[in-house]
Amino acid sequence: MSLSFLTGILVVLAMDAEASGMDPVILNVKVEGNVPASFLNAGIMEAVGIFRKAGIRIIRRASGRREEFAEPVENIEVRVVETAPRDKRPAVLASSLPYAKSGVRVFVYYERVAGVTPMPNPIVLGYALAHEIGHVLLRMDTHSDEGVMKARWNTSDFSWMQAHMLRFSDDDAEMMRRNLGHLKGAADCLQSGGRPDDMPHRPCDKSQ
C-alpha cells in the first residue's frame, strides 16, 4: 500500500468524522412520474456517502413523516421527475438553481440518468444528485476541472464512480463547508437577537 493511498484513506476517515458532528443539510425529495423507489433510495444513499467524504452531513426527510432534526443548517427541495423538459439538452441529466434561496432548487431527470448505462445504475443517480446539490451549496453555477463538479464526466470519471472514489475537489469541499458555516453562524446570530458582537467573525444583520 502506497503512502499516498494511505494518506487518502486517512483524509476520508477524518472527513467522515467531521461530517458526523456537523449540523445536517436536509433533503426534501419529491417524485413525479414512474421512478423506481429502490433506484431512488440507492441513489440518495450514494449521494449521502459522497458528501460524507467531503465532511458534509446530508439527511433525507422521508415523505409524509415529520422527523425533527437538531439545527438543520440548510433545507434543499429536490424534485425527481420521470422525463426531462423539452428545452433541456439531451446530455443534461439534472439541473439546479444555485442562486435561489427557497423552493425547488434541484431537478433530476430519471430517464436521462437511467439511460447513461446499459442498465439503470443508481450510482450515476447519486453523482448527478451530488453535482447539483453541490451547485446549491457552493452558491454558484460554475464547474471545476476535476471531481464531482466537472462539467462533463469522461470514461475515467465513470470508472472512479463505480469504485465510489470520485470525490469533490478539496477546494470545492472546503468552500461548501465554509458556506454552511456562514449559514449556521447567521442563524446563531439571529437567535441571539442579531447582535454582531455575538458572532464577531460572521457578519449578521437582523433586518435581513
Image (cartoon, grey):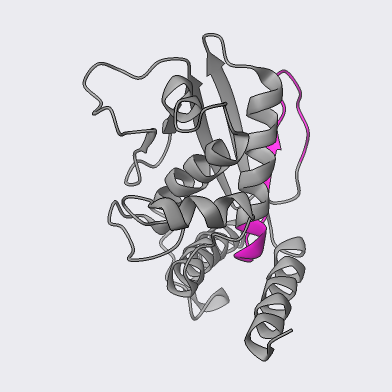
Q: Residue at x 71, y 76 (%)?
A: 9
Q: Residue at x 45, y 26 (%)?
A: 115
Q: Which residues are magenta?
A: 51-68
Q: Nearer the viewer, residue 150 or 81?
A: 150
Between 33 and 125, the one lying in front of the other is 125
The image position of residue 22, as x and y in percent, is 70, 62
- How many marks the image carries: the answer is 0
Q: Residue at x 72, y 27 (%)?
A: 62
Judge left or right: residue 192 versus residue 87. Answer: right
Please check the rendered image and state whether residue 117 is part of the magenta-colored stretch, yes or no.
no
| Residue nearest the observer in this picture, 115 or 202 | 115
Above or below, 158 relative to 78: below
Residue 187: which quarter of the image?
bottom right
Residue drawn at 45 percent across, 57 percent down = 156
Look at the picture and state if 98 lies above or below 201: above
Is residue 26 at least partly visible in the picture?
Answer: yes
